[in-house]
Amino acid sequence: MALSATMPKARGHGIEGVRELKDQVIGPSAWREVTQELVNQFAELSGDDQWIHVDVERAAAESPFGTTVAHGNLTLSLIDGMRRDLIEWSGFRLGVNYGWNKVRFPAPVIVGTRLRCYAQIVEVADIGGGWHQVVTRFTVESEGGEKPVCVADGVGRVLVEEA
């Protein structure tokens, strides 16, 4: 499965450029299919091989979803690739992933469905020493789904370039 090579939908240069994007809903990203192979690879990597994710026959017989579903943490990790379609920042010495504030999985990701993502910068704060904290809300939806499959507030920190 190839990752999207599209240009980001929004760009921000320096902290002022990022501030200009605040509160805009950016997206959607390109679609990304969640295959059983991808779920199995994640199960092997993470060590979470619960049957609801990897046992297709048992899931068909016993799961309320009628098939296997992706791990919530797999869905969360897919945001990193999809966000590259959405936002590109420049003009910083570096940026780091500081974590996640609130993560919810309102609906399951049924294996075989496609996902896409929207982003919205909800907070930009100066935290001192040239660092700024940027909170971005990511909303992941499944094709044809009624509710999002993931809503998560990612927290990043960027160090501004010296003048």
Image (spheres, grey):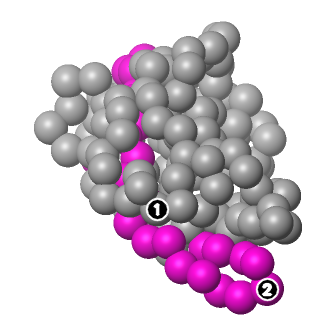
Q: Residues within 10 Å of mark 2 (few under 14, many from 20)?
A: few
Assign the C terminus to one quadrant of the image. bottom right
- In the image, residue 130 lies in the stretch drawn in magenta: yes
Badge 2 amino acid: Gly
Magenta part of the chain: 107-133
Mark 2: secondary structure: loop
Tell me if 125 is positioned left or right of 104 in this view.
Answer: right
Return the residue nearer the eye: 128 or 87: 128
Residue type at mark 1 is Arg
Relative to 75, residue 30 above or below? above
Residue at 40% across, 36% down: 117
| Percent position of residue 148, x then y | 27, 45
Which label number is shown at residue 129?
2
Left or right: 16, with 41 as reference point: left
| Residue indicated by mark 1 | 19
Return the disc, 2 or 1, that comes first in the chain's sequence: 1
| CA gap, disc 2 and disc 1 | 18 Å
Q: Quadrant of residue 15?
A: bottom right
Q: Which quarter of the figure is the N terminus placed in?
A: top right
Q: Which residue is located at x 44 percent, y 71 percent?
A: 123
Asked if residue 150 can be seen in this view, the reply is no
Tell me the residue at 43%/19% (across/down): 31
User: Relative to residue 101, is residue 108 depicted above or below?
Assistant: above
As helix, strand or loop, the secondary structure at mark 1 comes to helix
